Image: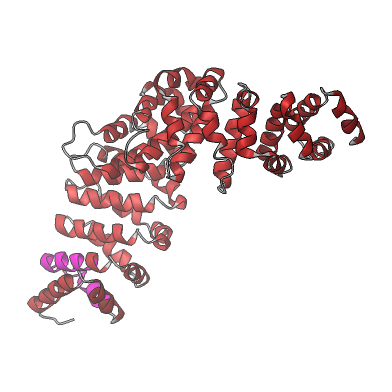
């Protein structure tokens, strides 16, 4: 607050250095230190502006201060600083904005206060560090779904895509991060492809010409490509770019986040039958099956989702069954993870079309057992019910296994479910198939008739 120029400059320097310590910067804000800093921002003294912007950047590192700066009107001041023609002032101010946007509660509020317009202006800078912090801010803001549409329609997408090919490693990382967030909506997915982001994203994943591999950039880029692959209307273009081949290169990588993104990409492509010829050439089923045994939940989930999509095709079904996929899936049906379980059961139902459950009836009983199959049959969820009906029908097709089927008391729930309105047509067919198989033996027919 002192009117002397040198004194205030030294005070700004002291605050900048002290605020590198978390306790010091928090104490400073609690003691109402933001207001005098904000007042100095209107000064014409460039050196003081540089130091106070740097001080605010350090102060904004703490979560509690991110809230304080916003509530005390600091965003308007920092927004003006980020447009300053001086590179250092603009760089530090953009860094403050990027820090503030890390707080979830700030993201929407900052957009409502018009921060995007100021970031757009900052991105016109020729300075790498200014662009880097601006892109970081956009990446943070884009993690709030409410902001995605505004960011896309603002015209910033072109600047973000351009940053994918920056010589600066962090600019590339933040650009890939922003696109992975923005690529979660249909509107933006189409824009990303149409504005030629696919090849730069693929280059970031491969990083063949980089001296230093940046794993985080790879993770964000493959996630963005996987998000794009969720849109079937883009598959033809993505397949032409050889995105499917790229994804298959990373299903064995040691980085599990990168592997998960690659598997999700394959799963999304596998959900569309027009991609099967390409996947038949590049996709190694054994690698997908091996990933089912991984200790990481998302790796397992993405693997089984990919197998579920592929198992609707007869050729892939044969490959999954011959590769031991059915046995691995059967060993996982008792998982407590409902999302994972539904994917497993759906895949097994698809594989049953290739005879996997009929040919492996003993394995089904060993891994699942009749009480569990009855529980599946009586479940409210359609996928659980269908799996139970399919498995029981296939087991009942083996004469030597009909005794344990009958002894389990399955006949009553089979007949009850067949009469229920809750039963879908496919489950009813499987139930009829099971009862038909059980009625092959004469002694069983009396019991079936008595049960109604």
Q: Which quadrant, please, contains the C terminus?
A: top right
**Residue 53 in sight in this render:** yes
55 up-or-down from 142: above or below: below
- Say how many tags the image has: 0
User: Relative to 416, is 189 on the left or the right?
Assistant: left
* Of residues 122 and 338, the one drawn nearer to the viewer in this rendering: 338
Q: Which quadrant, please, contains the N terminus?
A: bottom left
- Stretch of the chain drawn in magenta: 34-56
Residue drawn at the location 43% of the way across and 37% of the way down: 227
Residue drawn at the location 76% of the way across and 40% of the way down: 408
378 up-or-down from 356: above or below: below
User: Relative to 390, is 164 on the left or the right?
Assistant: left
- The spot of residue 327 in percent (x, y) is 54, 31
How did the renderer colour the structure? secondary structure
- The spot of residue 409 in percent (x, y) is 79, 40
* Of residues 314 and 364, the one drawn nearer to the viewer in this rendering: 364
Check residue 288 for magenta coloring: no
* Of residues 212 and 290, the one drawn nearer to the viewer in this rendering: 290
Q: Main secondary structure of the magenta part?
A: helix
Residue lying furthest left: 6
Check residue 43 for magenta coloring: yes
**Residue 33 in sight in this render:** no
* Of residues 186 and 418, the one drawn nearer to the viewer in this rendering: 418
- The spot of residue 416 in percent (x, y) is 83, 39
- The spot of residue 300 in percent (x, y) is 47, 40
User: Relative to 293, is 388 on the left or the right?
Assistant: right
């Amino acid at each position: 607050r002192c009117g002397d120029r040198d004194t205030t400059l030294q005070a700004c320097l002291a605050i900048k250095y002290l605020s590198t310590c978390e306790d010091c910067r928090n104490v400073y804000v609690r003691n109402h230190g933001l207001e005098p800093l904000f007042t100095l921002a209107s000064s014409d003294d460039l050196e003081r502006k540089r130091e106070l912007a740097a001080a605010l950047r350090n102060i904004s590192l703490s979560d509690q201060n991110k809230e304080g700066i916003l509530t005390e009107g600091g965003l308007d001041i920092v927004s003006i600083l980020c447009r300053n023609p001086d590179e250092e002032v603009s760089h530090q101010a953009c860094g403050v904005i990027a820090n503030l946007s890390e707080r979830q509660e700030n993201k929407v509020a900052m957009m409502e206060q018009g921060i995007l317009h100021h970031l757009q202006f900052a991105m016109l800078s020729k300075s790498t560090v200014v662009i880097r912090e601006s892109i970081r801010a956009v990446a943070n803001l884009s993690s709030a779904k409410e902001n995605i549409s505004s960011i896309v329609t603002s015209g910033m997408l072109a600047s973000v895509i351009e940053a994918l090919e920056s010589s600066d490693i962090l600019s590339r990382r933040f650009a890939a991060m922003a696109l992975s967030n923005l690529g979660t909506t249909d509107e933006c997915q189409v824009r990303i492809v149409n504005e030629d982001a696919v090849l730069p994203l693929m280059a970031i994943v491969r990083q063949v010409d980089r001296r230093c591999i940046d794993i985080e950039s790879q993770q964000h880029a493959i996630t963005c490509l996987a998000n794009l692959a969720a849109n079937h209307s883009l598959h033809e273009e993505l397949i032409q770019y050889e995105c499917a081949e790229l994804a298959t290169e990373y299903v064995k990588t040691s980085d599990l986040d990168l592997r998960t993104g690659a598997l999700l990409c394959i799963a999304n492509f596998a959900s569309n039958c027009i991609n099967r010829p390409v996947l038949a050439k590049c996709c190694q089923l054994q690698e997908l099956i091996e990933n089912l045994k991984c200790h990481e939940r998302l790796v397992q989930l993405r693997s089984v989702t990919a197998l579920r999509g592929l198992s609707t095709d007869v050729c892939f079904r044969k490959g999954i069954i011959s590769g031991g996929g059915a046995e691995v899936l059967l060993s996982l049906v008792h998982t407590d993870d409902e999302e994972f379980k539904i994917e497993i059961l759906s895949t097994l139902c698809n594989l049953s079309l290739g005879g996997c459950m009929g040919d492996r009836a003993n394995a089904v009983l060993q891994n699942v057992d009749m009480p569990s199959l009855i529980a599946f049959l009586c479940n409210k969820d359609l996928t659980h019910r269908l799996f139970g009906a399919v498995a029981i029908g296939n087991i009942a097709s083996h004469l030597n296994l009909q005794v344990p089927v009958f002894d389990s008391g399955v006949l009553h729930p089979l007949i009850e479910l067949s009469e229920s309105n809750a039963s879908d047509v496919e489950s009813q067919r499987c139930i009829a198939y099971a009862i038909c198989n059980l009625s092959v033996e004469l002694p069983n027919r009396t019991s079936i008739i008595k049960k109604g």
